[in-house]
Image (cartoon, rainbow, N blue to C red):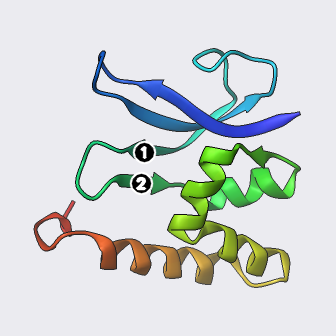
Amino acid sequence: MVRIRLRRTGQRGQPSYRLVIADKESPRDGRFLEIVGFYNPRTEPATLNIKEDRVYEWMSKGALPTESVAQLFKTAGTVERFERFKAGESVETLLAEAETARAAHLPADKTGK
């Protein structure tokens, strides 16, 4: 079974995470199939970048998010957009909506990057 889960990166005491597609049996920081995002809980507010088109594709193939990743997806609104994707809405409109929502949550000095 394929899972969408967090892979820890960063130095000791300074964690950051990659959202990866990995087999259920592989270790936390072991083999993975694809990187689909990045999460840094140390910034204020926490940084969360998700390649939603790849997440939609993997979830439509049967990949399940772990509990922590499901909570991140719920916070970012990815779960609601995926439900609309399954209902037949186009990926382009959903990705545009996700980008505008992400830009609205960025601080004013970070909008250019």
Marks 2 and 1: in contact by CB < 8 Å?
yes
> At label 1, which amino acid type do we have?
Tyr
Quick check: 65 above or below 99? Answer: above
Q: Quadrant of residue 2?
A: top right
Q: Residue at x 41, y 54 (%)?
A: 48
Foreground: 3 or 112? 3
Q: Residue at x 79, y 54 (%)?
A: 59
Residue 32 position within the rendered picture, expressed as x and y whole percent measured from the top left: 67, 25
> At label 2, which amino acid type do we have?
Leu
Residue 22 position within the rendered picture, expressed as x and y whole percent measured from the top left: 72, 30
Instruction: Single out the residue that lies furthest toward the left.
Output: 109
Foreground: 9 or 75? 75
- Could you tell me how many numbered marks the image carries? 2
Q: Secondary structure at mark 2?
A: strand
Q: Secondary structure at mark 1?
A: strand
Residue 92 position within the rendered picture, expressed as x and y whole percent measured from the top left: 61, 78
Instruction: Return the mark for residue 39.
Output: 1
Q: Quadrant of residue 72?
A: bottom right
Looking at marks 1 and 2 on the same chain, the residue that comes earlier in the sequence is marked by 1
Quick check: 76 above or below 89? Answer: above
Q: Residue at x 61, y 79 (%)?
A: 94
Quadrant where the C terminus is found in the figure: bottom left
Gap between marks 1 and 2, in whole Å? 5 Å
Q: Residue at x 68, y 68 (%)?
A: 79
Q: Left or right: where does residue 74 sit relative to residue 3?
A: left
Q: Residues within 10 Å of mark 1 (few under 14, many from 20)?
A: many
Q: Residues within 10 Å of mark 2 (few under 14, many from 20)?
A: some
Q: Left or right: where does residue 78 sit relative to residue 2?
A: left
Q: Left or right: where does residue 96 sit relative to residue 106?
A: right
Q: Which residue is mark 2?
A: 48
Residue 70 position within the rendered picture, expressed as x and y whole percent measured from the top left: 66, 54
